[in-house]
Image: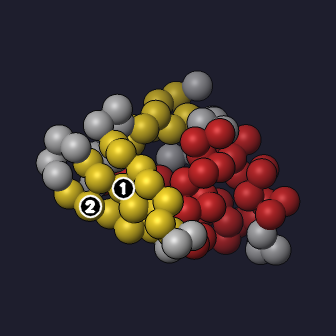
């Protein structure tokens, strides 16, 4: 995974904010997923900025964290989405 990719969310995902946390329902598999406050923030940024480089830059302004740590966390988050069938990653 690299910053020159973009995230495309599955069309089968229903997302609802509940008490500052995002609840995701995969309508196809009927599996639920819960995101904590940080995961919800990352989800929202990726929704607005599909390109990982743009999302990374927005998150870098928001969080006081080293670039390498943020990049690793962002990639790990996206990999979990992909592994659970919630999104796919494509080259830009």
In the figure, residue 50 lies in which quadrant?
top right
Numbered mark located on residue 24 in the image = 1
* CB under 8 Å between discs 2 and 1: yes
Q: Residues within 10 Å of mark 1 (few under 14, many from 20)?
A: some
Position of residue 16 measured from the top left corner of the image (x, y, whole percent): 44, 54
Q: Which mark is residue 32?
A: 2
Q: Residue at x 29, y 53 (%)?
A: 25
**Residue 86 position (above or below residue 42):** above
Q: Residues within 10 Å of mark 2 (few under 14, many from 20)?
A: few
> Mark 2: which secondary structure?
strand
Q: Is residue 9 above or below residue 29?
A: above
Query: SS for tag 1?
Result: strand
Looking at the image, residue 2 lies above or below residue 68: above
Viewer can see residue 78: yes
Residue in the picture at 78% in, 50% down: 57
Question: Residue furthest toward the left?
Answer: 29
The CA span between labels 2 and 1 is 6 Å
Q: Quadrant of the C terminus?
A: top right
Q: Is residue 79 visible?
A: no
Residue 86: x and y in percent read 34, 46
């Amino acid at each position: 995974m690299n910053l020159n990719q973009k995230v495309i969310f599955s069309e089968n995902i229903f997302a609802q904010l509940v008490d500052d946390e995002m609840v995701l329902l995969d309508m196809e598999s009927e599996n639920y997923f819960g995101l904590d406050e940080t995961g919800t923030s990352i989800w929202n940024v990726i929704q607005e900025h599909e390109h990982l480089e743009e999302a990374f830059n927005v998150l870098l302004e928001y969080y006081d964290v080293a670039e390498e740590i943020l990049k690793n966390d962002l990639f790990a988050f996206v990999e979990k989405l992909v592994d659970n069938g919630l999104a796919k990653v494509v080259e830009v």
